[in-house]
Amino acid sequence: MKRVALRLLWCGLAMLALGACATAAPRPAASASAGSGAGVEAAFGHYCDLLRAMDHAGIAAMFAADGEVDNPGAAPIRGPAAIDGFLQGFSDYHVLSYTTEEVRTVVHGEAAQTTAIFHQRVRVPQGNVVEVSGRLEAHWVRAGKDGWRVQRMATGPL
């Protein structure tokens, strides 16, 4: 049970770490008409801004209706409502620092993929600081006038 709890903590912190991809400047929301990778990059930037603000409902709304969070060693969390509920469990965590490297986005028509390596420091509710690093992979789908939505978000160790 403790191992599962630690994995879920790591995965939750890894989900928070996705905010590492964004810079301090606000980014516009993606539009469905944006060309090549620009629309996906804007959607990823918006997603990261929501993560930085710890806007769990906003993050969950970025997922497609059947979108999922895939955590190592745990069943996928499917759908915006379930993802919101999962992220709400991390409301008492505070991101202290975050960086990413090797961010890459590839677009194939109505689908896209973003990959990156992240590093993050988080103060957990007990007051201690945890450092988390890993890989993230976001699969996107174009959702008509709603722009790009996350189909699948996965994090894992380096």
Image (cartoon, rainbow, N blue to C red):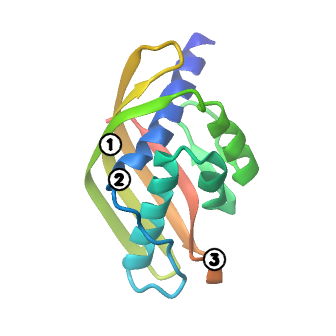
- The quadrant in which the C terminus is found is top left
Please name the amino acid that badge 1 sits on: Phe
The picture quadrant where one finds residue 120 is: top left
Please name the amino acid that badge 3 sits on: Asp
Q: How many marks?
A: 3
Secondary element at tag 2 = helix
Q: CA distance from mark 1 to mark 2?
A: 8 Å
Please name the amino acid that badge 2 sits on: Cys
Q: Residues within 10 Å of mark 3 (few under 14, many from 20)?
A: some
Label annotation for residue 21:
2
Which residue is drawn at the image coordinates 45% and 85% (left, top)?
34
Of the numbered discs 1 and 2, the one sitting upstream in the chain is: 2
Q: Which residue is mark 3?
A: 146
Residue 119 visible in the picture? no
Q: CA distance from mark 3 to mark 1?
A: 27 Å
Q: Which residue is mark 1?
A: 118
Q: Are marks 1 and 2 in contact (CB under 8 Å)?
A: yes
Secondary element at tag 3 = helix
Which residue is drawn at the image coordinates 48% and 68% (left, top)?
43
Q: Position of residue 84 (x, y in %)?
A: 68, 45
Q: Residues within 10 Å of mark 2 (few under 14, many from 20)?
A: many
Of the numbered discs 3 and 1, the one sitting upstream in the chain is: 1
Q: Residues within 10 Å of mark 1 (few under 14, many from 20)?
A: many
